Each structure stands twice: as structure tokens, then as C-alpha cells.
Image: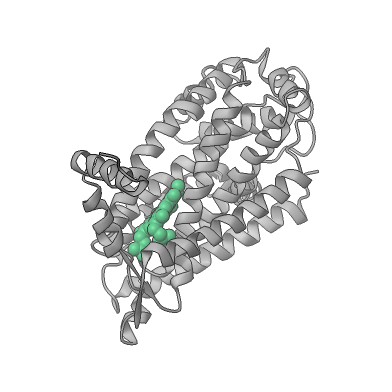
Amino acid sequence: MFMNEGQHWAKLWHWLDERLGLTDIVKLVRKKEVPVHRHTIWYYLGGMTLFLFMIQVTSGILLLLYYRPSAEEAFESIQFLMTSVEFGWLIRSIHSWAANLMVFTLFVHFFSVLLLKAYRAPREVSWLSGMGLLALTLTFGFTGYLLPWNELAYFATRVGTEIPGSVPLVGPFLRRLLRGGDDVTGATLTRFYGIHVAILPALTTLFLGLHLFLVQKHGMSVPPDVERSGGAKNMMPFFPNFLLRDIVGWLTALAILAALAGYFPAELGKKADPFQPAPAGIKPEWYFMFMFQTLKLLPSYILGIEGEVIGIVGFGVAGLFFFLVPFLDREEGQRWSDVLTWIGLAAIAYMIVLTAIGYLVSPTK
Ligand code: HEM
């Protein structure tokens, strides 16, 4: 007996459904809904970060086809990619720009979740896994910066790995661990490469899996001020309504990314030469600028303790504090509830002002 095309598909669906439980997945997707209220826009930021992360994985794999992780060949392999490989420059520029955009959307996601208090029970582990993702993403940025082995990256990494060296007790060990020796050398490059292409992707996959699983499990939170005024009036089906809006956001991000990568291709500069003095204008990536600038502005000694040490320990304590946020602020109306909103706003203002000072008042070029 002959089957028409529709019957073929139905048979295939049935075959797969029996083995993979597709009907259950479809039921789950149909059931998923997103609350609609005045802060719904912030729900798009996590998905946009995820989209940019997927671009990073894809473009990163393509870069791996040409990149060589040694002090002798890294710079040359990127130079070859930029000049002789078709669209090599574009893939590298996309990887570099998408990294910056991803850190930006991640910061916005982080602060929106903080200010909307989406970390409260039962979402404490969503928050903790998110903090893990934040740390992993910043480490991606730090390790990736060195990989082209150009002058700017080399000296910025020297400064960047020197800084944890002044942490009391563990500092010197930490510096050697990061550098794979006393100075930044080919050993550091190999180490950063291993971390960037193997360890971080593996850990990020684990943390992201947990994070997204928890988002599905708990659904989206409704912010306290919306709850106070009677809760979300409407629910939007995730499929297709919310997903289509998500896709509009992704396409917008893609358009911005394409324009940046096309009009401002990633630069390469000169090959690193460890025997040359550090050139003027050594700067970290913009998302580390507020920390870098803080350390620069602190006096050499505060109450007999090195200013830099106080700064580093201060940032460490601040990081730990943000980890603990869901355990400090549990309910509306309690002491921590307003304090944390103000701390969040102050942190945003601090980061913007110090970054601006870093670029405007102490120009690095
Ligand atoms: C690679 C980094 C990250 C990715 C790809 C990611 C992805 C997502 C996605 C897709 C959602 C659901 C939609 C949304 O609320 O935007 C979400 C929700 C959430 N994320 Fe993230 N996230 C990341 C980092 C973070 C960070 C740094 C934090 C905070 C420490 C965080 C905390 C949360 C919380 C608490 C929710 C639940 C929000 C709610 O229920 O209203 N995430 N994340």
C-alpha cells in the first residue's frame, strides 16, 4: 500500500515519539507561559545572552581551525587568518564583538534580576548558578584577550596577573598558577588557551544546563511591585508569542553585531615582545576598567596597608556579598529589601562613573 507524504511524517513522528517522548516535550512547551507586566522587557536579556553565547561557541570553533597556541605561532596564525583566509577577519571580528556584547547583555541581565528581586525563594540556586556564569564569562574574556599574543594583550595580561599577586598569603601562589611561571610567557599562553577552549566551555555548559533547567522548573518570577498592585494581569504563551519576540531581539543583536564586525574589524597590532618596555596605553577590556581604575585611584597606603591590597580584597568581599544576596533579602518589607535595591543602583552608578573616568580623565591611548 502507498503512503502519502503526510502519512510518512506521521509515521516518523510516531516512531520518534515512542523513543524520545516528543509528546511530553510538546505538552511542556505548550504549557509554558510568561507573565505580562511593565517589567516584562527584562525577561528578554537572559535569552539574548544565550544567543550571543551560541555565536561565541560557533565562531570560536571556526577560529580553532586556524589558531596555533604557542608564543612562536599564535600571532602569525591570527595574521594569516586576518589576511589570507576568506572571511577569516569576519569570523574573528564576530568573536571579538559578540564577546563584548555578551558581557554587556549579561551585566544588564544580572542587574535587572537583582533589582526585580528575582533571586528570592525558590530561585536561590538560579541566582547562584548565574553568579557562576558571570564569573565564567569574565574569565572567558580575560583568557581570550591574551590569545592573539599581541603587544597590548601581553602587557595587559602582565598587569592583570600581577594584581592578584598582591592578595595577602595566597597572592604569589595565585600569580604563579595563572602565569605558569614567574612571568607571562608561552607557558601562560598555553595555559590560558586550555582554560579558554576546554575548561570554561565545559563548566559553562554545566552551569548553563542547571540555570536553564531551573528557569523551566520555576517559570518567570513576578516582581514585588507588580505583585503589590494585584499581580500580572495577563500571561503570554511562550510558544510562539514570547519566542517570536525573543527572535526579534536576537535578530536586532545580530544586526548590531554584523554592523560592528563589518565596520570595525578586530585589530591585531604588533606581535608581543617580552623584552620591550611596556608601551603607553595599556588597558584592560572595558568591563574590567572600573576595577582597574579603582586600583589606580587608591592611595599607595591606607592606614599602613597597601592601597592595592585593600582594593582587591574589597572587590573580593563585594563579589562574595553578591553571592549571598538571596540569603540576605528573603522577603518584601524587611530591612535588606530596600538596602539591596540601593546597593544595586549604587553599584551600577559606580561602574559607569569609574569606567568613564578610566577612558575620559585618564585616557589610555
Ligand atoms: C551566560 C550567562 C547567562 C545566561 C545565558 C542566562 C540565561 C537566562 C535565561 C534564558 C533566563 C530566562 C529569561 C530571563 O529571565 O532573562 C534566565 C533567568 C534568570 N537568570 Fe540568568 N543567565 C545568565 C547569567 C545570569 C546571572 C549572572 C545571574 C545573576 C547572578 C542570573 C540569574 C537569573 C535568575 C535569578 C533568573 C530567573 C529570573 C526570573 O525568574 O524572573 N543569570 N537566565
Picture coordinates of residue 357, whole percent (x, y): 70, 57
* Vertical side of 339 occupied by 192: above or below: above
Residue 271 image-quadrant placement = top right
Tell me the quadrant of ligand 1: bottom left
Split into 4 quadrants, where in the image is the N terminus?
A: top left
Image quadrant occupied by the C terminus = top right
Residue 299 appears anywhere in the view: no
Residue projecting furthest to the front? 1
Outermost residue toward the top in this view: 72
Q: Residue at x 41, y 78 (%)?
A: 37
Farthest bottom residue in view? 229
Compared to residue 273, the image places residue 209 above or below, namely: below
Q: State how the image is colored.
A: one colour
| Position in image of residue 204 (x %, y %) | 40, 39
Which sits in the foreground, 94 or 102?
Answer: 94
Residue at 30 percent of width and 43 percent of height: 3
